[in-house]
Amino acid sequence: MIKTLKEIFKQLDKMTYKIMKYGLEFCFTICILAVFILFTYHFTFPSPSMYYIGISLFRISLIFGIEFIICGLVVDGIKKQMI
């Protein structure tokens, strides 16, 4: 299964691959920011608002990452008229 996923990603259109790559880098940056906020919450004075901001950013980064992958695969399929 992992082998087939690698093959699918290798066959992506260059523009779709570039958009997916930059999108995932953006999501990773948001995730790192969320982890930093949660570490700050853990090691300093705990504030409920800081916790909720960190958890929300982490969830948003995961959701956006999954959406970039799924939408990239669907757009590539539409471009190649497979769908």
Image: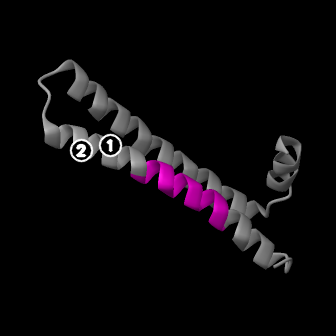
Which residue in the structure is indicated by mark 1?
55
Image height check: is 24 above or below 15? Answer: above
Quarter residue 72 falls in: bottom right
Give the left or right position of residue 82, taking residue 64 as reference: right
- Residue at the image point whose x is 29% and y is 31% from the top: 38
Image height check: is 51 above or below 18? Answer: above
- Residue at the image point whose x is 79% and y is 72% from the top: 77
Q: Are marks 1 and 2 in contact (CB under 8 Å)?
A: yes
Indicate the position of residue 13 as horizontal and vertical percent values.
79, 64
Magenta stretch containing residue 70, yes or no? yes
Which residue in the structure is indicated by mark 2?
52
The disc placed on residue 22 is none
Three-letter residue code for mark 2: Tyr
Question: Which segment did they paint magenta?
Answer: 60-71
- Residue at the image point whose x is 59% and y is 60% from the top: 68
Which structural element holds mark 1? Answer: helix
Indicate the position of residue 1 as horizontal and vertical percent values.
85, 45
Which of 40 and 79 lies nearest the eye of the viewer?
A: 40
Which of 4 and 76 lies nearest the eye of the viewer?
A: 4
